[in-house]
Image: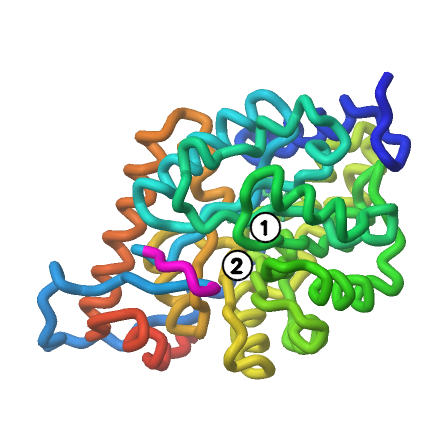
Amino acid sequence: MALDANGHPVSRISQRKLDHLRLSLEASVQSTRSAGFDRVAFPHVALPELDLDQVDTRTEFLGHPLRLPFLISSMTGGAGPAGDINRRLALVAQVMGIAFGVGSQRAGLSFKDLRHTYQVRSVAPDVLLFANLGAVQLNYGLRTEHCVEAIDMIGADALVLHVNPLQEALQAEGDHNFRGLLGKIEKLCKELACPVIVKEVGSGISGDVARRLVEAGVKAIDVAGMGGTSFARVEAFRRERPEDVEMALAFSEWGLPTVDALRQVRQVAPQVPLIASGGLRHGLDAAKALALGANLTGFAHAVLAAASEGEEPVRRLLEGFAWQLRVAMFCAGAANLTALQSIELAELR
Ligand SMILES: Cc1cc2nc3c(=O)[nH]c(=O)nc-3n(C[C@H](O)[C@H](O)[C@H](O)COP(=O)(O)O)c2cc1C
């Protein structure tokens, strides 16, 4: 059987991608704790002095214009059905003027015949498109030229590096050595022509970690906080022995809730382009995340079921989120996203 750079059989990487999709759709893999959006509320403005139909949701991220501050978060690629999902999501991103990220391209780097499962430019020529690789791979043979290859493979505008220590620790086949990664990320930021974004995968990026990443040259942060997809639960359900399942499930509640991560990162890095993801269920959560200082709001699990059905269900779902965002802006008296971002949310007890 063919092996990847680390000696893993290729079918194992593709199988893992399929497991992640299947479990995220079928198993109970949502965090048992909240992302925190239920703890905050907009002050209601009964006299908004606005026309709902003229509320302006346009923005830009890393210099790229967007019609809505939405991102379809990095999820998949590296297996046939994953390619269909990527193309559907990218097509909707193109039609709606929002951003899109493919999942980890490690399988595509190792195996040329899987590259098409990430390639979406034919259906999404104008989309703000993010490539994706695991930062820990910088300790396992991933070099700058491989990152350039991943970016060129899909014609990406930026590279997302995910940091996922909990997931790697709980995976039977996980990579454990996270030592010295910050220096390698710094070197990569200097050597790459396009911006580097760092994200978690559902355990959150704290203010302290964000500060170190920004000092290293990272151009944007996606907090990917706790409260949505729990990779402790995903990886638990991939284990066979009951004791391994129990071992991983103990970490179901691990992580920094998205709302707290956003607040921490905004405090230490007021200017950094910031993506809120992790447990965003709809457009009102997105509106709250924007008021907490996010520039872009990311959805993974929320769109996955629709993505397995087709483009139209994804488009309808995201149009609904856009409508909810506009209603929240209207009732909070915010004519545009700059005004929304200056609103102070009330704390609910
Ligand atoms: C099926 C699935 C696969 C994922 N694969 C990746 C990945 O390859 N790279 C990555 O950076 N994040 C990956 N993620 C994490 C998401 O991008 C996101 O950070 C996380 O799911 C939290 O968002 P959510 O609560 O909206 O699901 C994946 C998530 C899901 C549900």
Instruction: Name the residue beneath numbered marker 2.
Output: 34
Mark 1 falls on what kind of element? Answer: loop
Query: Residue at 86% of width from left, 30% of height from top?
Result: 8
Front residue (pair 51, 77)? 77
Residue 5 % position (x, y): 86, 35
Can residue 166 be seen from the camera position used here? no
Q: Please give left or right for residue 166 compared with residue 159 in the image.
A: right
Q: Quadrant of the C terminus?
A: bottom left
Front residue (pair 301, 338)? 338
**What is the basis of the colouring in this image?**
rainbow
Query: Residue at 31% of width from left, 75% of height from top?
Result: 338
Rendered position, 314 above or below 342: above
Query: Residue at 88% of width from left, 62% of height from top?
Result: 179
Rendered position, 157 above or below 89: below
Q: Are marks 2 and 1 in contact (CB under 8 Å)?
A: yes
Residue 70 % position (x, y): 39, 54
| Amino acid found under the numbered disc labelled 1 | Ser
Q: CB at mark 1 closer than 8 A to ligand 1?
A: yes
| Amino acid found under the numbered disc labelled 2 | Ser
Front residue (pair 159, 167)? 159
Distance, label 2 to label 1, CA atoms, is 7 Å
Rendered position, 179 above or below 333: above
Where are the magenta residues, as a range? 62-66
Q: Quadrant of the N terminus?
A: top right
Q: Please give left or right for residue 26 compared with residue 183 in the image.
A: left
Can residue 247 be seen from the camera position used here? yes
Q: Residues within 10 Å of mark 1 (few under 14, many from 20)?
A: many
Residue 31 bears which disc, if any? 1
Q: Is residue 334 in the magenta section?
A: no
Residue farthest along the top direction in this orientation: 1
Residue 143 % position (x, y): 81, 50
Q: Main secondary structure of the magenta part?
A: strand
